[in-house]
Image (spheres, helix red, strand yellow):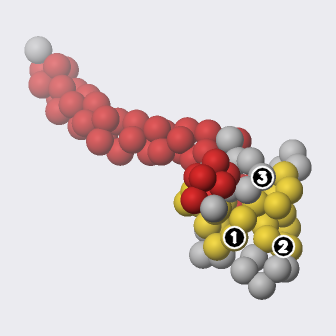
Amino acid sequence: MDILGTLGPLLLMFILFYFLLIRPQQKRQKSVQQMQSDLKKGDKIVTIGGLHGIVDAIDEDKIVIKCGDGSRLTYDRAAIREVRAAAETTLAKS
């Protein structure tokens, strides 16, 4: 009984730590990886550095972004933070 009284709170802390911190972080990481793998030409994106642009070309691990002034910049696929609008949404508005 003494071991249960000693290890019980420690085990409870580990379980709470897992469900409050580790598991949500794993879900966020999985959703970001899914978003980065679903990128397609024409998507409006934002990089982790704050650059806004449109996907112009996609390679295995690189992506070419067309900026507002017409320049094309090459980034790693992992540098994409979020997709603002899909290609179909921008075509529907035009």
The vertical placement of 48 against 32, above or below, is below
Mark 2 falls on what kind of element? strand
Mark 1 lies on a secondary structure that is strand
Answer whether labels 1 and 2 touch (C-beta < 8 Å).
Answer: yes
- Looking at the image, which residue is at 46% across and 38% down? 27
Amino acid under label 3? Lys
Callouts 2 and 3 close, C-beta under 8 Å: no
Which residue bears the numbered disc 3?
A: 41
- Residue closest to the eye, 50 or 39: 39
Q: Which residue is mark 1?
A: 53
- Mark 1 surroundings: few (<14), some (14-19) or many (≥20) residues within 10 A: many
Foreground tag (1 vs 2): 1
Q: CA distance from mark 1 to mark 2?
A: 9 Å
Q: Amino acid at mark 2?
A: Leu
User: Helix, strand, or loop for circle 3?
Assistant: loop
Q: Which residue is mark 2?
A: 73
C-alpha gap between disc 1 and disc 3: 11 Å
Is 74 on the left or on the right of 9, as rendered? right
Residue 35 falls in which quadrant of the image?
top right
Q: What is the x, y in percent for residue 18?
A: 35, 36
Q: State the residue in front, 27 or 36.
A: 36
